[in-house]
Image (tube, rainbow, N blue to C red):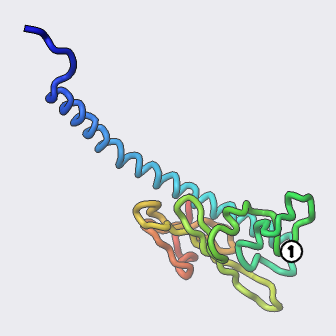
Amino acid sequence: MRKQKGFSLIELLIVVAIILIIAAIAIPNLLRARIAANEASAASGVRTINTAEVSYYSNWPGTGFSLNLVDLGDVAGICAGGNAPTALNACLLDNVMAQDGNPPNSGKSGYIYIYASVAGVGGINTGYVLTSNAVTQLQTGVKGFCAVQDAVVRFANPGPIAAGACAAAQPLQ
């Protein structure tokens, strides 16, 4: 009787079952890691926008804070040409953060940023409210982040966080 070479069907099924068990353990951890990375990116994005707003306010005190996120970027492409920034093209944010989506909305890493300026006396913007919420709650992120003109990043867990609730939200440590 001749011995056949190769694997039996039972051996192949056992290997496939082991692979499926390992995948069932690894995939939820991978999804949690992606959510954590998106949340870290969103908190960092809020910090970046806060820093850009403080710079904008000091560079254009007659305007105050920017009217929308697009003003913080370089829509006209003047920064690369060595031209001086303007109040409408401040060159303080990358264009992905500043103009991805329709102003005042912007998105990055599974989170959408919604920005609104607060008009004061004499046409000077005296404040702003920035929120960053997951595009798809529980899939791209869980927490919601926000900031106002005091530049303190705040969060709500679970999100989303509304613009009106930002000042009362817990500060991010």
Which quarter of the rendering shows the C terminus? bottom right
Residue at 63% of width from left, 64% of height from top? 46
Residue 35 is situated, as x and y percent measured from the top left of the image, at: 46, 55
Q: Which residue is mark 1?
A: 60
Q: Secondary structure at mark 1?
A: loop
Q: Residue at x 45, y 48 (%)?
A: 33
Residue placed most toward the observer, 39 or 127: 39
How many numbered discs? 1
Q: Residue at x 82, y 75 (%)?
A: 88
Furthest-front residue in this view: 1
User: Residue 148, percent across and down?
Assistant: 65, 74
Residue 118's place in the image compared with 172, above or below, is: below
Write down the quadrant of residue 77 in the picture: bottom right
Quadrant position of residue 145: bottom right
Mark 1 residue crowding within 10 angstroms, few (<14) / some (14–19) / many (20+):
some
* Residue 41 vertical placement versus 62 (above, below): above
Query: In the rendered view, does 166 fall on the left or right side of 60?
Result: left
Amino acid type, mark 1:
Trp
Give the x, y percent position of residue 82.
92, 58
Above or below residue 123? Residue 110 is above
Give the image quarter of residue 123: bottom right
Query: In the image as oriented, which residue stretches furthest toward the left?
Result: 1
Please identify the quadrant where the N terminus is shown.
top left
* Observer-nearest of 162 and 25: 25
Toward the right, the furthest residue is 83
In the current view of this chain or complex, which residue is farthest to the top? Answer: 1
Q: Is residue 21 left or right of residue 137?
A: left
Residue at (70, 84) in percent of width and height: 118
Q: Position of residue 70 (x, y in %)?
A: 73, 72
